Image (cartoon, helix red, strand yellow):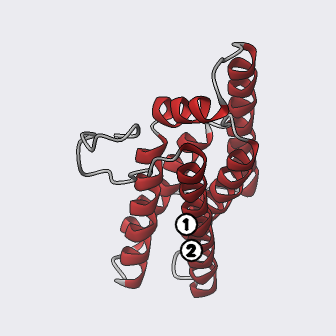
């Protein structure tokens, strides 16, 4: 298996940004009605943001576990590839109806994507794995800030668990 070149990574990021731009045009052109709070709550629900954030948290934890447990290159490549793919999927739902949230999520997703790429490329290169760990931690902090912003803006707590059904009674499951 070959390591992805910087060109391929840049091309993938460009593709995700293009999808995001198309989503922005599609979302903005519909002329959504309602209060900003209602628009944000609907967007969070429709995009499955809570599950996406929970998935990325799980990917981050899994990468840390696998790398620190020295479980081998195959396991590292798998979890880091999953982190990159899950981040690209999450990016595709941007923008949100809230500019501040969009900016927070975009920065978080960029860090998470780079973390996955660095982790995948590192192999036994300790310095690159350390950089990936720092990027994952910084990305997770931004994701946590985004969840807190949603709670502030909507008045409902965002449940980011991926292991239970959405029967919590809140507007986000």
Q: Which structural element holds mark 1?
A: helix
- Within the image, what quadrant is residue 119 found in? bottom right
157 with respect to 101 (left or right): left
* Placement of the C terminus among the 4 image quadrants: top left
From the image, tell me which residue sits under label 1.
140
Residue position marked by numbered label 2 in the rendering: 137
Asked if the residues shown at circle 1 and circle 2 are in contact, with their CB atoms under 8 angstroms apart, the answer is yes
Please state the horizontal and vertical placement of residue 112, each as a whole percent of the image: 60, 60
Tell me what residue is drawn at x 23 percent, y 42 percent.
Answer: 165
Dot 2 lies on which element? helix
Q: Position of residue 139 (x, y in %)?
A: 61, 65
Q: Is residue 68 above or below residue 81?
A: below
Near mark 2 (Cα within 10 A), the count class, few <14, some 14-19 or many ≥20, is: many
- The residue located at (23%, 48%) in the rendering is 164
Quadrant hosting residue 143? bottom right
Q: Quadrant of residue 171?
A: top left
Report whether residue 156 is seen: yes
Name which residue lies at 54% across and 65% down. 120
Asked whether residue 3 is in view, the answer is no
Separation of disc 1 and disc 2 at Cα? 5 Å
């Amino acid at each position: 298996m070959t390591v992805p070149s910087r060109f391929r990574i840049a091309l993938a990021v460009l593709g995700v940004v293009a999808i995001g731009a198309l989503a922005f045009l599609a979302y903005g052109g519909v002329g959504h009605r309602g209060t900003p709070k209602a628009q944000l709550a609907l967007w969070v629900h429709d995009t499955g943001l809570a599950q996406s954030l929970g998935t990325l948290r799980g990917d981050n934890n899994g990468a840390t576990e696998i790398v620190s447990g020295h479980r081998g290159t195959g396991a590292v490549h798998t979890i880091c590839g999953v982190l990159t793919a899950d981040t690209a999927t999450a990016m595709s739902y941007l923008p949100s109806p809230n500019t501040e949230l969009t900016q927070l999520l975009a920065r978080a997703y960029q860090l998470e994507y780079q973390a996955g790429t660095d982790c995948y490329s590192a192999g036994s290169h300790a310095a690159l794995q350390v950089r990936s760990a720092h990027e994952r931690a910084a990305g997770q902090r931004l994701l946590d800030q985004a969840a807190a912003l949603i709670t502030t803006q909507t008045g409902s707590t965002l449940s980011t668990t991926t292991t239970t059904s959405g029967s919590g009674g809140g507007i986000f499951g």
